[in-house]
Image (cartoon, rainbow, N blue to C red):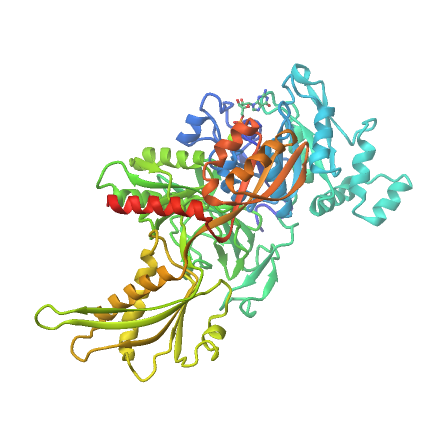
Amino acid sequence: MPKYAPSDIRNIALCGHGGAGKTTLADTLLNTFPIETGGTVKKLASVDDGTSICDFDEEEKAHKYTIESSVIHFEQGGKLFNIIDTPGKPDFIGQTIGALNGVDTAAVIVNASSGIEVNTRRVFAEAKKLGLGRIIVLNKMDDDKANFEKLLKLVKDVFGPECVPFNTPDGEGGNFKGVQSALADGSPYKDALLETIVTVDEAAMEKYLEGEVPTGDELSALIQQAMLEGALVPVVCVSGKTKVGLNEMLEVFAQCGLAPDKIKRNANSAANNASGGAAGDEVEIKHDAAGQVIAQVFKTRIDPFVQKLSFLRVYSGTLKNGQSLAASTSRRGIKIAQLFQMQANENKPIDEATPGMIVAVAKLEELETGTTLGDCIMEPIVFPTPMVGLSASPKSRGDEAKLSGALMKVSQEDPTFTVERNEQTKQLVITGMSEQHLLVVQERLKRRDKVELDTKEPKIAYRETIQSNADGMYRHKKQSGGAGQFGEVHIRMYPFPKGTDPETYATNKGQFPSFKNFTYDEATNFLWVDCIVGGVIPSNFFPAIEKGFKERMNRGVIAGYQVQDVCVELYHGKYHDVDSNEHAFRTAGSMAFKEVFQKAKPALLEPIVKMEITVPMANVGDVNSDLPNRRGRPLGIDDAGGGMQTITAEVPLAEVTTYNRTLASMTGGQGSYGIEFLRYDIVPGNVQQQIIASAQLADDEE
Ligand SMILES: Nc1nc2c(ncn2[C@@H]2O[C@H](COP(=O)(O)OP(=O)(O)O)[C@@H](O)[C@H]2O)c(=O)[nH]1
Ligand SMILES: [Mg+2]
């Protein structure tokens, strides 16, 4: 028998805008409710004086805000609560998204003194997309600016009419001394709440209309159903500071928070699965403690003591110490050494973990955030694509190896952080969600790994291409005593637009009457067609010629950027019995490519992104009139509720690398935006000349 049946577990993420009081609530819960038999945390911890249990990391203490999610647990009323405190800053949204993928319910914390803020909308939408139950917590009801009626109207306006109060405050601001249940007789919200709940069941609705009010188990079942369907979003009032409303909030968490077996989740069977089904079969997860193991990693942390910690949500089966399991990111499978139950940064060894549990395992290098354990594969967790890059190098020479090790650790922990060497610009580029995100990463590197960085804005990854056909040849000939060098290559070049089918194009007899063969490279969308007749170049030199083309493509021709979307037809050439060799043909290939490319109307391509910019109504005009200065093209505008509008636009990436600063100053910090890569477009002539000029300048300096 599992220690906790799924019906006795509640997994809830505290999420919402920064400063709403999520971490304070989590710390207060630990101070109020017993951690199994061990009693409560004696002293009330505080974010403000750096004693928070959840914000334990040095960077969190220094900034006084949450950077990483942390998992805590406690028991109350026979139920186990696994609570995840998440960061409220959009810079660290990756941690919040990960946490939402480990729970069944999102408690969206609204700051009663400042209303609904940017990131609160974002996380509410993310939770809805994942099909999670949602509860709105109006925190800081003790603040003088808190006004319940106004807040409730705003909440309904922004999040919908399904948001109904489960309790109401008794006094506001300094007088906030309790809450009253909306289900109590005489509550002005009782009818609205019951009507919302019974809508999910026709029979219950009929009975209700005849005057029969659901109670007890029937009411609980209806509430779970309404939460599952998203027909009900309970609203509760609390103060994490004064603890007023805390017990009642937890009662609502227990009653309305979805039990871990409620949400229908699917997985695909992997090859060689134990259940005998075919690979790829979709199976519905059964949440059965005796069934096959299905668990997913939703967070990874590199701990100074136990090294890699992988946070798991168990969906089915029972995980045990010493057990061997398949894992979606390991070919050989893994063996669980030790399971832990987490209390922020403390790990308590446990023997097993049953469906619905949130636990951690240590030292399994093969696991990544998103890995599924067991014979099934769950959908990967979708994280936002980071777009703000910096080129980085270690401050002290000789720290290169240390730096790359340290960066590797961060990229394992943080799915919204990437590090790569840009082959075109030869820079080490770190990419994150924002400048602030990358600053915090640098602070962590300095403290944890003792390595400091020099950073500067990275070059944009432009590309080169051609806009017309051209024809030409190159003869590589050298005679310097002894054996010479000889290779001659004649080529035609054609623009090769993305999406063209290489085989259809190459085998078109009208285009290439003496077609012999073709090779295609998908990454650069490069096609080369062999049309050599009568062996004027022996085919054993073709790989060398191709190497020459590709080297030139990587180096670029007009400004030093990767070439793409080109077709080359090799149609004639000459060789020499003694002087021809691979080196000569490689050089001839590279030079022929360069010469013909220059005749084929070369052009630069730039990345175009789609932006979604959400701002208060009053700032829409400013944002719209700024976009044309950035060569942006507005696509549309939508109402985002609560007096906010979302502008969608297409903009060249080069024009928005520091947009966060612009938007912050334009909207007084109220605006937010997302960026998504769309495609490469030709750079307009005047801008192109500037880029080429600065590329040549850099060339001369080298
Ligand atoms: N008045 C009042 N202040 C609070 C309350 N909860 C948190 N705070 C304060 O609000 C600030 C932000 O709290 P924190 O828990 O870090 O917010 P988070 O970013 O949502 O985790 C801190 O200064 C807290 O002391 C509350 O219920 N009432
Ligand atoms: Mg916090």
At x 80%, y 37%, the residue is 194
Q: Does 529 sit above or below residue 652?
A: below
| Residue 113 or residue 70, whichever sits in front | 113
> Could you say where residue 691 lies in the image, as x and y percent from the top left?
38, 45
Residue 559 in view here? yes
Which quadrant would the C terminus be assigned to in this image?
top left
| Residue 217 or residue 134, whichever sits in front | 134
Horizontal side of residue 52 vs 28, given as left or right:
left
Quadrant location, ligand no. 1: top right
Residue reaching furthest left?
481
Residue reaching furthest right?
210
Horizontal side of residue 159 vs 597, given as left or right:
right
Instruction: Tell me which corner region of the image, top left, top right, bottom left or bottom right, holds residue 254.
Output: top right
> Could you say where residue 555 lies in the image, as x and y percent from the top left?
31, 56
Horizontal side of residue 102 vs 403, given as left or right:
right
Residue 119 in view here? no
